[in-house]
Amino acid sequence: MLKLARFLLIPLCLLACIGVAIALSSSPASTPEALNGLTDRPLVIAHRGGRGLWPENTQFAFQRASDLGVDVLEMDIHRSRDGHLVVIHDRRVDRTTDGQGRIRDLDLSQLQALDAGYRWTADGGQSFPYRGQGIRIPTLDEVLKAHPRQTKVIEIKVPDADLETQLCQQLQAQGQTQRVIVGSFYERSLQRFREVCPQVATSAGPSSVKLLVVLNWLGLSDLLSPSYEALQVPEEHDGLPIASADLIANARERGLHVQLWTINEQADMQRLLAMGAQGLITDYPDRALQLLGRQTALARQDD
């Protein structure tokens, strides 16, 4: 029995030493430049520009959300057949426009001929107030030019070859590398983007989120040295809790800015903010601003 104890003690001591060494050498993330001046209060992040209020991922939505007083605009990008980065969520245009087809099969001229406000409705399809109003699918370049000072979250929606380099070049050309946080559900796209554009902040990819959840569960969050600056997660996924108060606290200890999606009800917003969430990614940014007691620009204009 004594021999067995000694036999087990050696590897356990080695593991403990390795753990201590990793903990001592691990380092937290730094606050991204894109959030400088914004970290003293919970952030209101307009999901796709506020898709519950206006046609999503359009210049109209981004301008209205900006006028409303949101802190961050969130958007998605794909690439057209002729190589332009366009701002749209789905791989196809069918759900949000009067057209049909895959984005990668359509040229920019074809995409921008579509009515991007055609299918938006707030009453279950009884009315479509934005049809025929000239709302179209914008290019990323157009959005960057229209909102040079606004902080933006850009999600890479497809793992197209070298899209990451093209995105980096556009951010550099517009002088907005310090105005953006880039995210994706494709881990390789994020890794590639970090390689070609290290000056731009990123959020955790799926594998990084899983690792953080496991480390948190094991009580080993201090071992994490994040290669990203923001943690953008849902409260739960497939019925499994993700954003617990414990995980949020530990993520913040590692220097991460914790932003939860997609939070649309004020009761949930209040509860998650009380748990330590630092940002709310929401389809209804007006509700979040109201909850936080922040008067909106649109409200002042209407007075």
Image: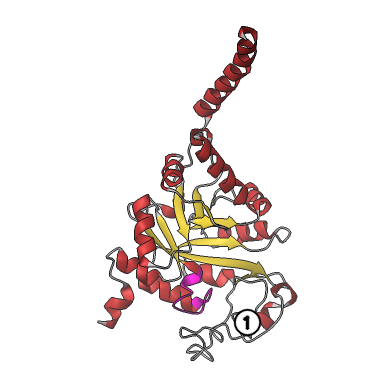
Depicted 123 relative to depicted 162: above or below: below
- Residue at the limit of the structure toward the left, as seen here: 303
Name which residue lies at 32% across and 73% down: 297
Q: Residues within 10 Å of mark 1 (few under 14, many from 20)?
A: some
User: Please, what is the three-letter code of the amino acid marked with disc 1?
Assistant: Gln
Q: Nearer the viewer, residue 136 or 6?
A: 6
Position of 149 with respect to 120 (left or right) is left
Residue 266 is situated, as x and y percent measured from the top left of the image, at 36, 66
Q: Is residue 23 magenta?
A: no
Depicted 242 relative to depicted 166: above or below: above
Name which residue lies at 52% across and 83% down: 120
Q: Is residue 50 magenta?
A: yes
Q: Which residues are magenta?
A: 48-59
Quadrant where the image shows the N terminus:
top right
Name the main secondary structure of what is drawn in magenta.
loop
Residue 281 is situated, as x and y percent measured from the top left of the image, at 45, 62
The part of the image, by quadrant, that contains residue 252 is: top left
Q: Nearer the viewer, residue 217 or 169?
A: 217
Please give the residue where the numbered disc 1 appears in the rendered image. Answer: 112
